[in-house]
């Protein structure tokens, strides 16, 4: 049964419920070892496959081409370095000259319009033929021209003055910007040095403070977590070690007490031959789901009461399961198909060390129920392959009576010290295994 569980890496909930805590720990350790072994095999296989495969290189679809110059080198142009490039002052002068030309053109156009209006007014009016009127108009025209010339001169001087001021302001602003940038860079450098110095100093102070705090007061939470982790690891190691010691010790004890001779005698000529083992039944309810591999028999974990009774009568009763060692009568510790709660109710009436062996109500097998000082423990007994053994143990017995007799002298587990001291019998109201023998 254990080998089948490790092969499938699966255990049904009903079967798991019948296991004790020690058996669950042993099963967990063995399943974990099987998982690690499978992982190592898979990693080795993948490394071999990767070594044989070569990944093709993908052709690059992106490319960059640089413009080449006359010297077949990459063509580079930096503004201001070429002899034909203008300076900043020359560019400003060109812009100002262009603006002055546009302004003069607009003013000439306005003057041309005024002259045209004067000529039209002068030659179209009949009242303008007197010399006085002509003189007045000439004087007015000259005055207008003089004023226009003065205005243009003032505007030109104002434009020149503004341009000079603008150039001076731009140059001063440029110098100020350069100076500000230098000062800003210097201030940034000093500030960065100060921040680094403060950071290093603060880092050292915080480190010393934390170190002093750690030396003065231990972190209780961290210590508790570390202690719990170490305790859990030590407990797992201890359980594994105890399991190995149990197997080694029980194997030696079995040899010393003549268990090998008993097995040889049981299957030898002194004992009458057992009837042939019945053929396996075809249970369509669970054969597909619980037996995925052909040729491997697996204990059913979801069986009805009728199936369990038929299994006991056809496969276990010929082996005199549940009888005393001399096969004279049914053993006092044997019980029928009862639940875990019913077994605990029976054991609660006795003292620690009381035990019973019951037919499991969920699987085709037996359960050894034992009463401790503060709790009850239930150990699953594997009844497959024509022998009886506790799940997780390696010693096989030819009958339930031999298994019980062996653990009356030897504890089931070293950690729990479960030694079978007193069998728990039937209630006075009646026996619970009547339906198994009828």
Image (cartoon, grey):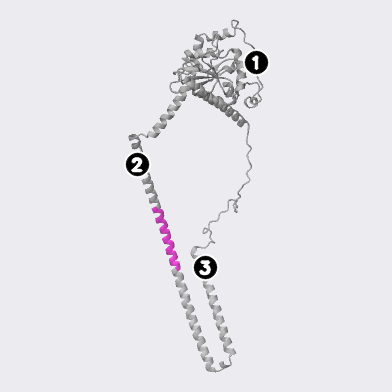
Q: Position of residue 26 (x, y in %)?
A: 51, 22
Query: Residue 227, labelled with which disc?
Result: none
Query: Residue 95, labelled with which disc?
Result: 3
Judged by its main secondary structure, the magenta piece is helix
Left of 89 or right of it: where is 64? right
Q: Residue at x 50, y 66 (%)?
A: 92
Query: Residue 278, labelled with which disc?
Result: 1
Name the mark nearer the viewer: 2 or 3.
2
First-in-chain label (2 vs 1): 2
First-in-chain label (3 vs 1): 3
Q: Is residue 246 magenta?
A: no
Nearer to the camera, 293 or 18? 18
Q: Is residue 185 magenta?
A: yes
Quadrant of the rendered structure where residue 127 is?
A: bottom right
Q: Position of residue 415 (x, y in %)?
A: 45, 20
Q: Secondary structure at mark 2?
A: helix
Q: Position of residue 304 (x, y in %)?
A: 60, 24
Q: Position of residue 19 (x, y in %)?
A: 52, 23
Q: Which residue is mark 2?
A: 205
């Amino acid at each position: 049964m254990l080998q089948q569980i490790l092969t499938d890496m699966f255990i049904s909930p009903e079967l798991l419920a019948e296991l004790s805590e020690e058996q669950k720990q042993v099963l967990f350790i063995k399943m974990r070892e099987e998982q690690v072994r499978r992982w190592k095999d898979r990693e080795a296989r993948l490394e071999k496959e990767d070594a044989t495969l070569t990944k093709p290189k993908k052709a690059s679809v992106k490319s960059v081409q640089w413009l080449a110059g006359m010297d077949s080198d990459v063509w580079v142009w930096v503004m201001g370095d070429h002899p034909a490039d203008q300076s900043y002052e020359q560019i400003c002068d060109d812009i100002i000259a262009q603006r002055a030309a546009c302004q003069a053109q607009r003013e000439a156009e306005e003057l041309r319009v005024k002259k045209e209006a004067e000529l039209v007014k002068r030659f179209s009016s009949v009242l303008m033929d007197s010399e006085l009127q002509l003189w007045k108009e000439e004087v007015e025209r000259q005055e207008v021209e003089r004023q226009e010339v003065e205005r243009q001169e003032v505007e030109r001087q104002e434009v020149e003055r503004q341009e000079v001021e603008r150039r001076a302001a731009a140059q001063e602003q440029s110098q100020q910007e350069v100076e500000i940038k230098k000062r800003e860079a210097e201030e940034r450098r000093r500030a960065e040095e100060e921040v680094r110095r403060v950071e290093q100093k603060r880092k050292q102070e915080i480190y010393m403070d934390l170190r002093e705090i750690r030396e003065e007061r231990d972190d209780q939470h961290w210590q508790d977590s570390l202690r719990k982790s170490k305790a859990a690891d030590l407990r797992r190691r201890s359980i594994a070690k105890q399991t190995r010691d149990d197997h080694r010790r029980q194997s030696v004890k079995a040899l010393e007490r003549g268990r090998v001779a008993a097995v040889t005698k049981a299957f030898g000529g002194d004992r009458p031959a057992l009837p042939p083992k019945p053929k396996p039944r075809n249970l369509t309810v669970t054969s597909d789901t619980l037996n995925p591999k052909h040729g491997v028999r697996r204990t059913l974990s979801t069986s009805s009461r009728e199936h369990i009774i038929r299994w006991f009568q056809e496969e276990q009763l010929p082996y005199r399961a549940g009888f005393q060692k001399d096969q004279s009568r049914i053993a006092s510790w044997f019980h029928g198909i009862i639940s875990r709660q019913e077994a605990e109710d029976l054991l609660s009436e006795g003292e620690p060390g009381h035990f019973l062996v019951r037919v499991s109500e969920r699987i085709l097998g037996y359960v050894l129920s034992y009463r401790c000082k503060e709790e009850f423990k239930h150990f699953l007994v594997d009844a497959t392959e024509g022998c009886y053994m506790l799940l997780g143990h390696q010693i096989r017995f030819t009958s339930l009576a031999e298994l019980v007799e062996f653990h009356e002298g030897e504890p089931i587990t070293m950690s729990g010290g479960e030694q079978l001291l007193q069998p728990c019998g039937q209630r006075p109201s009646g026996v619970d295994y009547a339906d198994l023998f009828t």
